Amino acid sequence: MNAPIKQPADARKVIILGAGASRADGAPLQAGLIPEFANIIHQRGISGTLRPADQDLCDFFQKFWGANIKSVDWDDETYPTFEEALGLLELANARGEFFKGFGSLPHRTPLAHKIHAHLIGLIATVLDHTLQGINRHHDTLAHSLGQLGWFGKTSFISLNYDLLIDNALRRELEVEPDYAIVFHSVTEALGGGTDTWEPPLLKLHGSLNWLYCPTCNAMDLFPGAKIVARLAHDAPNLVCQTCKEPRLPIVIPPTFFKVMSNFYLQQIWKRAEDILRQADHLIFCGYSFPDADLHFKYLLKRTEINRVSNQDSPSQLPLSEFPSEEEYQPEHLEVFIVNEHAGKTSEARQAEGDRYRRFFRDKANIHWTKLTFEDLAADPTTYADPANWI
Ligand SMILES: [Zn+2]
């Protein structure tokens, strides 16, 4: 196999982080969030009275999914994925429809809205419990990129809500990432002036450290690592300073996109498109390329087809000067996949590989590596070494 067309040090790189990257640092996958929450409830002791939010969630899982968290056999119960749970509430909300007992009277906060807030608190609880500030491989990645001097040509896209990469970049560079959002207020701001370079980090499905006020249409940033613990323990007190109405983190399951009309998310997606269009190397980490992520695939396809070229775009030329297909050479895009992990079956590898290969146009430029996220974090140059490609 040939070396990459562009050397990794020179290439504009986008590191795309999927759920598998967070799992390398101990975060549960979507399907594991609610079982882990049940586990935490039982560790705390089920005999006493549950906190009202936890009681509401237990009722919700029982009523909607027949899953009894409080049962002595709670680990034999089958739980929905987080996406299913949140997505159905979002869909009912978008359609102006209610589930029986979960709708609203005008003077009451709809139970569905409360459950929505509780579900976000649930992720925060689980992440706070499972990660405990441990961030090893993301920290290693940020440190290795710094050692190589690659930050100036590296951007990050994260499909995760957790703060693993955010915290790692902040620790390494001592600035907040550039989220492509103008925040209304930055609480407990950490140094860094306006002329400080910040690493671009586009979180396409939201982030637990952004609190959105739907009343003011304003987004606040909570820098630092403490917000997850606060959400887990103190969610009702996160009211907007301006209007005193509740704020919520922006957390959007990939399958549900009405919330894409959110002004802030549109800015993030636009910036992601610009960055992807100019990228030479896309490095996917722990991302299985699921069929459900059609909006992300749309973005990738747009940026693959509408590449920025060193030449004039054919559409800007008079027809007589139109280059032939051989003459018109958009900049090459190369795709690298870092998806290995212990226990991965050959069937899963094959299915993921097929999804990547059928999606991108230039099959020769798709490089499936035998690297884990840990390998890449320890030495980011490994992705571009043909010896590591399968
Ligand atoms: Zn407000």
Image (tube, rainbow, N blue to C red):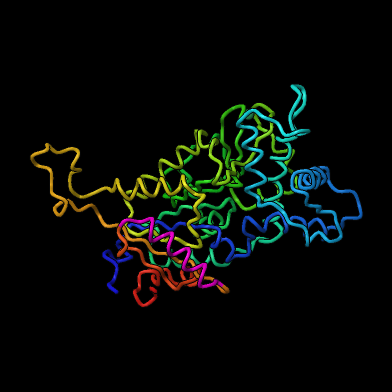
132 inside magenta stretch: no
User: Which segment did they paint magenta?
Assistant: 344-361
- Please tell me whether residue 95 is drawn above or below residue 352 in the rendered image: above
Quarter of image, res 247: top right
Name the side, left or right, on which 83 lies relative to 61.
left
Name the side, left or right, on which 125 lies relative to 277.
right
Residue sitting at the far right: 47
Residue 327 point in image, percent of width and height? 13, 53
Instruction: Out of 200 and 110, give the one closest to the viewer.
Output: 110
Residue 176 appears in the picture as rendered: no
Question: Split into 4 quadrants, where in the image is the C terminus?
Answer: bottom left
Residue 170 point in image, percent of width and height? 53, 55
Give the quarter the ligand 1 occupies: top right
The residue positioned 82% from the left and 45% from the top of the image is: 55
The residue positioned 23% from the left and 52% from the top of the image is: 330
Residue 174 appears in the picture as rendered: yes
Question: Split into 4 quadrants, where in the image is the N terminus?
Answer: bottom left
